[in-house]
Image: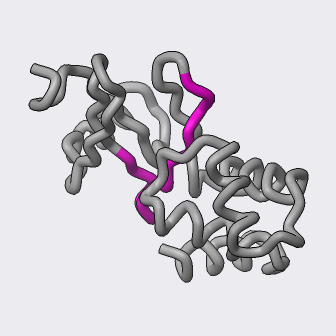
Amino acid sequence: MVDYTLDKLRTHGYRITQPRPVVIDVLTESHGHLTSAEILERVAAVDKSIGRASVFRVLDLLTSLAVIRPVYVEGRSPAYVMLTPEGHHSHIVCVTCGHVIELDTCVVDGLDEQLEEQYGVQLSGHLLEFYGTCAQCR
């Protein structure tokens, strides 16, 4: 995922500055769902010279390129998730404890083509959240 993201940056004309691979590594290793505060903490643990503003600029850039998306879980700051190269991310959020279960496969295959045809759009990806109660909380 790191190489894919760095290639995407280069393809869109962006240089690979010092903070960019570090932030991408942090997001990739965590499998996402980190708040900006958690990302800042982990980036600082890797490289103390990378400032807060640089991290936020990288997050904004990655969001604008549809590499990551912010998700909002009740009562928390937005957490950032990595999208697949196809632009997908799906998970289940426990409404009791907040535990997030990542879905390994795309559960809406075929729906994208149907939506494109029905609404005359070209989709580039999706972020899908299901809510429920996890096995431990039940």
Q: Confirm whether residue 13 shows in the render.
A: no
| Residue 83 colored in magenta in the image | yes
Residue positioned 30% across, 18% down in the render: 95
Q: Position of residue 15 (x, y in %)?
A: 83, 78
Q: Confirm whether residue 74 shows in the render.
A: yes
Q: Which residues are magenta?
A: 76-89
| Left or right: where 40 falls relative to 130 | right
12 relative to 65, above or below: below
| Left or right: where 11 falls relative to 110 | right
Q: How are the colours assigned in the image?
A: one colour
84 relative to 92, above or below: below
Q: Position of residue 83 (x, y in %)?
A: 46, 54
Residue positioned 26% across, 42% down in the render: 101
Residue positioned 42% across, 38% down in the render: 127
Most foreground residue, 29 or 120: 29
Most foreground residue, 58 or 7: 58
75 relative to 39, above or below: above
| Residue 96 colored in magenta in the image | no
Badge count:
0
Q: Position of residue 58 (x, y in %)?
A: 77, 58
29 relative to 125, above or below: below
Most foreground residue, 113 or 26: 26
- Quarter of the image for the C terminus: give it: top left
Q: Position of residue 99 (x, y in %)?
A: 31, 34
Most foreground residue, 17 or 127: 17
